[in-house]
């Protein structure tokens, strides 16, 4: 237990370092933008004197590292800057509204991927080289080769006049869970299908390798029913690799959710923050949105690392 806590502590201690690194990368890339934040904030009617006064007041004429230091300090206090004309529109307020929707879509797609891919992968391994395995492998290849954005566009066209809405506001999960589920169902399916194909193959490969180990043959030869051996030993050992891969897929799902939101007109991080910032030339909005998505991805992967430690007892003593 002490070793497990120490390993978890290492991951948590690395979190601030990774956040600072990501914030520096995002800030550096956005600093290369030719768009003048003063012009974006004050509008077309601003005089040159007003633009210069804004730059001085907000430290836009300071050296790069001084500007980054101010940005990092404000970020640690929850201030990601302002966007639009004036200073009343705070990036953090818009992100606070959009991020929960993106996370809901991401984890709904992840839920669909897990509950479908894991049983299919296990079933394919148990019936290796027989017709269930062949059918599942065909469908997994189709899933892998299906881009999420292409499937999303097809679903929009197919269900345009159906009870499953493809546009409009997303009802609050706590107020109208049925309406929320119906609104999120098609985007989540479009997001999950490629991951289902990938995870099915990973689970099948991991299960096949585990079923071929000596302890499985020994246990079955000793008279223990194969179903018990699979349920108590094989499944747990075979889950280690898929859980690791699943952590990497969460990043894909978050990135895919940003695109899927635009296609299905969902006001998440993709449509309400990133796309809006790009269309309106609001650098601070794009910068804040990209930073929050990156930090969320880091946190999710740390959680997956902790789950990996809990599942795999062999590395707890490392």
Image (cartoon, helix red, strand yellow):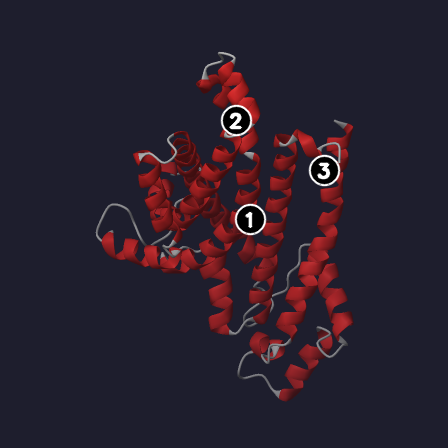
Please identify, in this view, whether the residue under mark 2 or under mark 1 is nearer the observer. 2
Q: Quadrant of residue 291?
A: bottom right
Residue wearing tag 1: 248
Callout 3 crowding tier (Cα within 10 Å): few <14, some 14–19, many ≥20:
some
Image point 62% across, 78% down: which residue? 38
Q: Position of residue 68 (x, y in %)?
A: 73, 67
Q: Quadrant of the C terminus?
A: top right
Is 253 left or right of 86, judged from the image as shown?
Answer: left
Q: In what element is the residue under mark 3?
A: helix
- With respect to residue 262, does 246 lie above or below? above
Residue 240 x, y percent position in the rendering: 57, 35
Quick one: label 2, few (<14), some, or many (20+) residues within 10 Å?
A: many
Seen at 37% across and 31% down, the residue is 127
Nearest-to-viewer mark from 3 and 1: 1
The CA span between labels 3 and 1 is 18 Å
Point out the residue furthest to the left here. 161
Q: Which residue is mark 2?
A: 234
Q: Is residue 170 visible?
A: no
Residue at 68% in and 83% down? 52
Contact (CB < 8 A) between labels 2 and 1? no
Considering only vertical position in the picture, is 107 above or below 84? above
Q: Give the secondary structure at mark 1.
A: helix
Tell me the number on the disc at residue 8.
3
- N-terminal-most mark, 3 or 1: 3
In the displayed structure image, the side of residue 244 where residue 60 appears, left or right: right
2 or 1: tag closer to the N-terminus: 2
Residue 222, relative to residue 55: is it above or below?
Answer: above
Q: In which quadrant of the rendered image does the N terminus lie?
A: top right
Please state the horizontal and vertical placement of residue 82, each as a whole percent of the image.
Answer: 60, 66
> In the rendered structure, which disc, 2 or 3, sits on the residue that comes first in sequence?
3
Q: Nearer the viewer, residue 7 or 108?
A: 7
């Amino acid at each position: 237990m002490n070793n497990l806590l120490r390993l978890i502590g290492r991951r948590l201690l690395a979190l601030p370092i990774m956040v600072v690194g990501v914030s520096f990368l995002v800030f550096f890339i956005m600093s290369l933008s030719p768009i003048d934040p003063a012009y974006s904030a004050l509008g077309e009617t601003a005089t040159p004197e007003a633009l210069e006064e804004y730059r001085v007041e907000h430290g836009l004429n300071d050296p790069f590292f001084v500007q980054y230091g101010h940005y990092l300090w404000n970020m640690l206090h929850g201030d990601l800057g302002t966007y639009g004309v004036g200073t009343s529109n705070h990036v953090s307020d818009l992100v606070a509204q959009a991020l929960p929707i993106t996370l809901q879509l991401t984890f709904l797609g992840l839920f669909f991927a897990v509950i479908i891919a894991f049983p299919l992968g296990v079933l394919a391994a148990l019936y290796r080289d027989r017709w269930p395995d062949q059918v599942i492998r065909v469908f997994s290849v189709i899933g892998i080769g299906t881009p999420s954005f292409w499937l999303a566009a097809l679903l929009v066209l197919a269900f345009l006049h159906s009870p499953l809405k493809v546009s409009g506001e997303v009802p609050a999960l706590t107020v109208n869970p049925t309406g929320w589920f119906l609104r999120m169902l098609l985007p989540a399916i479009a997001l999950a299908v490629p991951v289902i194909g990938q995870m099915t193959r990973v689970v099948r490969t991991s299960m096949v390798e585990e079923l071929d180990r000596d302890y499985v043959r020994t246990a079955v030869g000793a008279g223990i029913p194969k179903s018990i051996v699979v349920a108590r030993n094989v499944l747990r050992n075979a889950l280690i690799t898929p859980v690791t891969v699943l952590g990497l897929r969460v990043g894909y799902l978050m990135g895919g959710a940003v695109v899927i939101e635009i296609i299905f007109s969902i006001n998440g991080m993709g449509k309400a923050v990133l796309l809006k910032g790009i269309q309106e030339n609001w650098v601070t909005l794009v910068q804040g949105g990209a930073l929050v998505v990156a930090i969320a991805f880091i946190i999710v992967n740390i959680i997956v690392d902790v789950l990996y430690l809990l599942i795999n007892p062999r590395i707890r003593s490392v």
